[in-house]
Image: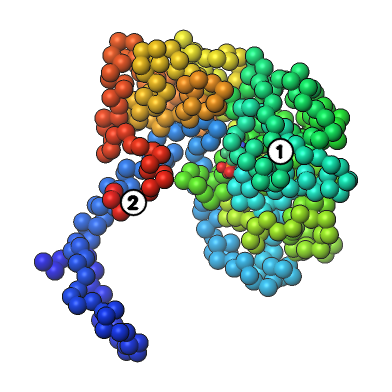
Amino acid sequence: MGRRGVRVAASDVPTSIHLRRSYLRERPAALPELSELDVVRHFTELSRRNFGVDTSFYPLGSCTMKYNPKVAERIASYPGFAHLHPLLPQLRMGGILTQGALEVLYEMERLLCEIVGMAAFTMQPLAGAHGELTGIMMMAAYHRHRRNHKTTVLIADSAHGTNPASAAIAGYTVASVPSDAQGGMDVQALKGMLNDQVAGLMLTCPNTLGLFNPNVREICDLIHSVDGLAYYDGANLNAIVGKVKPADLGFDIVHLNLHKTFATPHGSGGPGSGPVGVVEKLAEFLPVSTVIKRSDGTYALEYDRPNSIGYIAPFYGNFGIILRAYVYILMLGREGLERVAENAVLNANYVREKLKDYYHLPYPQVCKHECVFSAARQAERGVHALDIAKALIDRGFHPPTMYFPTTVKEALMIEPTETESKETLDAFIDAMIEIARLAETHPEQITAAPTTTPVGRLDETAAARNLNIASL
Ligand SMILES: *Cc1c(COP(=O)(O)O)cnc(C)c1O
């Protein structure tokens, strides 16, 4: 047909490479022949099959899929930042071209120290889990330095799966601390597990049930009583940002997920940033390099750190992500960050109150940034958490997190985030109520979902294990 979108000029570069005949095509490749309009329509159609915060409500608990201001994207794309090459010799020496970037890193460390109450930060870790590993490696360095013989890290049974994985990779044995009837860490059980072997404890507070543990200070004191360190998993800091400093609760190490709390959209595995903050006594173990401010006011990278755990990331972390977070924090300021926590908590409790008569709520107390329902009541009618999730897709909403935390049967973990309006929450609540009613009267309509998507129910395990995008 000869249809085409663009006409590429004939090459005027002489061919100098002589390929063997067997490498050459005998006839032209069978490429699709499409006009520009056909191509634009094809890709626009594909893009519409994407689901994101920019298209619809995305209450994926423990993931904080919130709207992130586009101004942070804009600033991160400024050529002075985006085109900065990490191998510029000036970076190491602190030369003029790199002063702006180094200042961002330095100031960002100061801001995060202020927000969580720590003495020093490293901005290098490339994800939350990477921050955890960095933090636990510092824990190990601390104990080595003190000649402590420690083998075990204690972790709540409701913890994010990365916590035990990080502690194990750092060489520790993991012991799981059970939850009590209120859904928090069981302090009596913790006391029974304490001994000289305990290197530290990892805690998420509020935990993955969205519940703030009122005993958190006592828990940290108990860990310190055996010369252990208390690690705060601050992946979802939006619940307490500007309100509570983990250092004031007794924590020694904290990681944050900039790609959940501080203005980087996330999903599909990256890119991320999981900076780690530590109290003064652990600062000497921070990874190399660190950013320093010299007496003349200029910035440089410092490598001479004899007790450091060493290199944990190439160059200096995901700079573009750190820059977005810096813009976001400066834009909101102290009051704005407090509003983030207030709205995140208000929105989650609004959803909790409105849905508690329709779905079982295993822990009915006031929650923080997310609430966890159970579809146990609907399951009696053959409608499971998975079916409810699929029915929500038909109604234009992304499903909540399902079957996590594993301490709740048929869990539906909803995190509305701080950025959603009352109208959006009401529309979601209406959909959830409609699904609960249909589960009673016409359960087959829910188990048949989704009916509006290009593909129906997929074998998600097989899709992940045997990914074949060519067949899509
Ligand atoms: C997301 C999350 C993590 C892990 O962060 P990644 O960037 O995905 O590695 C750790 N803990 C909690 C509580 C989380 O929600």
- For residue 113, above or below residue 446: below
Q: Which mark is residue 469?
A: 2
Q: Is residue 213 left or right of residue 146?
A: left
- At 69% from the left and 71% from the top, the residue drawn is 90
Image coords of residue 42 (percent x, y):
25, 52
Q: Nearer the viewer, residue 40 or 198?
A: 198
Residue nearer the viewer, 26 or 450: 26
**Any atom of ligand 1 within 8 Å of the CB at mark 2?**
no
Colouring used for the render: rainbow
Amino acid type assigned to the residue bearing label 1 in the image: Thr
Q: Ligand 1 falls in which quarter? A: top right
Q: Secondary structure at mark 1?
A: strand
Q: Quadrant of the N terminus?
A: bottom left
Answer whether residue 135 is visible to the viewer in this image. no
Q: Could you say which disc has been placed on residue 173 in the image?
A: 1
The answer to whether mark 2 and mark 1 are in CB contact below 8 A is no
Q: Residue at x 38, y 30 (%)?
A: 397
Crowding at mark 2 (Cα within 10 Å: few <14, some 14-19, many 20+): few
